[in-house]
Amino acid sequence: MRYQLNDYSVPTSYGYCDVLVRGYVHEVVISCGAEMIARHPRSYEREDFVFEPLHYLALIEWARRLTLRNRRYLEIKYVCLGGPVADRDPGGPYSAGDTGTNAP
């Protein structure tokens, strides 16, 4: 979220929530309802990005699960389609000189 030309992170679960930002001399406190969700040292720079890596942990975990799911899908598709020609066994059905028939 942005406060006085600087971006401060909040946990990803609060990404689209209405928040209350309180800027103090040394820190910025971000609350959602009665719950304090983030506290950062205040930056007086312009267009600075102050973040807490733990705020992105849920997003990283979600991306990791998505990547694993996609990898499994691609592996299944790879096996079902037989994979690229270069990865086939030399004596496989798509080897050099194969006419497309499986005759001995």
Image (cartoon, rainbow, N blue to C red):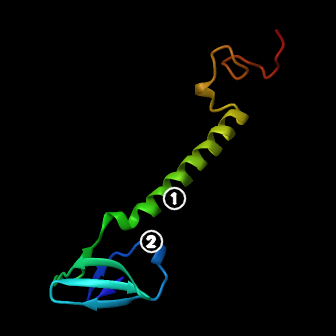
The quarter of the rendered structure image containing the N terminus is: bottom left
Point out the image quarter for the C terminus: top right
Considering the numbered disc 1 on the image, is that residue within a helix, a strand or a loop?
Answer: helix
Q: Is residue 82 left or right of residue 6?
A: right
Look at the numbered disc 2 and give the secondary structure of its residue.
helix
The kind of residue tagged 1 is Trp
Along the line of sight, the residue nearer the viewer: 30 or 9: 30
Q: Residue at x 58, y 26 (%)?
A: 86
Image spot of residue 103 (x, y percent):
84, 13
Give whichever of 10, 63 is nearer the camera: 10
Q: How many marks?
A: 2
Which image quadrant for residue 31? bottom left
N-terminal of the pair, mark 1 or mark 2, is 2
Is 104 located above or below residue 9 in the figure? above
Relative side of 48 to 67, left or right: left
Disc 1 marks which residue? 62
Read off the residue under disc 2.
12
**Above or below — where is 11 with respect to 67?**
below
Q: Residue at (16%, 82%) from the top-left corner?
A: 45
User: Residue lying furthest front in this view?
Assistant: 34
Q: Which quadrant holds residue 29?
A: bottom left
Where is residue 10? Give x, y as percent.
37, 76
